[in-house]
Image (tube, grey):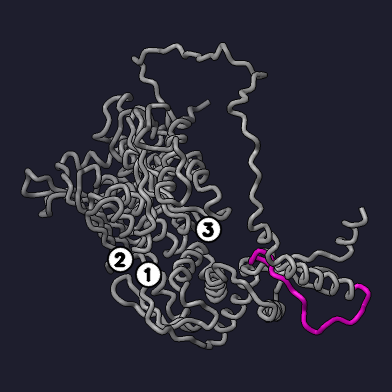
Amino acid sequence: MPDIIQLLPDSVANQIAAGEVVQRPASVVKELVENSIDAEATDIIISIIDAGRTVIQITDNGKGMSDTDARMAFERHATSKIRTADDIFSIRSMGFRGEALASIAAVSHTELKTRTADTEIGTKIIIKASQVESQTPVSCPIGSTFTVKNLFYNIPARRKFLKSNQTEFKYILSEIFQIALAHPHIGFTIYKDDELYAKYPISNHKQRIVNIFGKRMEKSLLPIEGETSIVTISGYIGTPDMAKKNNYDQYFFVNNRFFRLKSYQNAIMRAYEQLIPNREYPPFFVFFDIDPSQIDVNIHPTKTEIKFVEEYNICQLLEASVKHALGKSNIVPSLDFIDTEDYSDMFAIPKDAPVKIPGIDVRTDYNPFKTDKMTHQAPQKQSVAGWEQLFEGFETHSTVAQQIFSSAINTIHEEPTSESVTCMQIQKKYILTTGKTGLMIIDIKRAHSRILYEKFLALLQNQQRPIQRTLLPVHIELSYTESQILQELLPYLQTVGFDIELFGQNSFVVNGTPPDIEISTIENIIHAFISEYNERGESLQSNINETIARSLAQSSALYRNPVMQPDEMQTFIAQLFQCSMHSVSADGKRAVVMLEYDEIFKKFNT
């Protein structure tokens, strides 16, 4: 029987390795930028063309490489970070496996220009599909420039599965944000299709967060801190009003490396209990500084999954630190035992610490049947002042409720009722009204989103433009990403009645809105709309009118339901039932619940 086991050629092995390391253009950006950081760069320029399909170029002012190192860097498992297996558990650098450059060069046309400070001439290397085509001297500045062209040109199947340019660029930005947030001491400049997209100058952590996510975030960031012998925790959390329906703005970093860990996210969410609605997520940017021997970063090729030796104990410290930050800001009452200044090492016992035998204090003279007549006091009589406040509005609500049920009985017995529909508002969230077969409960916010959705969709389809002018222009500051999205959508927003103009690099002025929009909430509405629109991603290309109408309706629906008068409720109900689908909200959730009369009577007959 002939031998069938053979060694794979290096080019094939590199392509297989690339499948783990280089999943999409964003992976290339991540690996190359991390190399620049390890090279001690203080300024990194990122240029992206065609969402990375055509060109990805990373230029830095780091240490650069010698001729020999530049050539060796593209070999598999070539690294300057580790020499023995033990080094893996003391890593503070970003990359260390030595697979990235070999994997990238295996699936693209790669060019490297690099020079060190002690040489006047640098070196230029051109590699195609793992094959070195040339290495020549070149005049270039100190540092390195990697240019990756035609990514996945030799793996059509992988290239075919890439998403749209918009989506792939979002992935690239996500990787850049993760790195830029962890390294505010490094300046980043981003070019998209040869145009300046964003620039993040050298700053501190808080200013870097504001530069990326917009000035709106600045006043809503609360500092957190916590320290034991195990770990030091620092960073910022958002106030509860900054919570959103997605968890995009949640970042963990350990030794300046981004990671994800569900247990730590849950610890923060527990600290926000009763402060934010269910299924909403506050922003946070939390940094852990820990001895590298206490973590394992070598469990996944992308290095975003990390194991902690003291995961449970750090969880407790994290939750306490977040609660303390919220308490200091008077968002929640600060508990006495949550004080970062008085943290002792309750989560860690040093190995050389002496073991103390716990003591027990016992009262030998205690008698549970003995009473002290001298200290006995008669129970104080409770004050009854203000008891009538308990019944405020009771008669009114009882009268309305009686009208509703009387109307229901009349409907069942087919007796004539008044022309106006009897209705009642419950907790400012629901409207209770009568129908032919039962009692109807309407969720005000969801119903409002349905009304707005159908109205906005009609305006977009018919190219109509009703508008209400603002007394004074409303200025809005956005992040780079939000600014780009809003500029793309301005023509559509103008169609439904928004008058918004660009006012500076990332500033906008609102001069008018649709009649259904409350001017005082316009800034929140714009931010929420961009978030809703951005979250829908791929569906944008299929039916952009429906997507914009749905996102705009969701973000514009009543933020805080007002107290509604009977005539207002009747008008609201009439608008809802004029909709083609009145029973569901703009995003398909139930907006109307029906309690059948037969079901109600059964409740009383059991």
Residue closest to the eye, 44 or 380: 380
User: Callout 2, which amino acid?
Assistant: Tyr
Q: How many marks?
A: 3
Q: Which mark is residue 452?
A: none
Measure the alpha-carbon separation of dots 3 and 2.
Answer: 26 Å
Measure the alpha-carbon separation of dots 1 and 2.
Answer: 8 Å
Residue 421 shown in magenta: yes
The residue indicated by pointer 2 is: 197
Q: Position of residue 601 (x, y in %)?
A: 90, 61
Q: Is residue 531 left or right of residue 397?
A: left
User: Callout 3, which amino acid?
Assistant: Lys
Res 493 visible: yes
Q: Position of residue 77 (x, y in %)?
A: 31, 35
The secondary structure type at the circle numbered 2 is strand
Dot 2: few (<14), some (14–19), or many (≥20) neighbours within 10 Å? some
User: Callout 1, which amino acid?
Assistant: Gln
Q: Residue furthest front?
A: 374
Quarter location, residue 323: top left
Q: Earlier in the sequence, mark 1 or mark 3?
A: 3
Above or below residue 101? Residue 197 is below
Q: Earlier in the sequence, mark 3 or mark 2?
A: 2
Dot 3: few (<14), some (14–19), or many (≥20) neighbours within 10 Å? some
The residue indicated by pointer 3 is: 245
The secondary structure type at the circle numbered 1 is helix
The residue indicated by pointer 1 is: 484
Query: Could you tell me if the residues under marks 1 and 3 are in contact, i.e. CB atoms within 8 Å?
Result: no
Q: Earlier in the sequence, mark 1 or mark 2?
A: 2
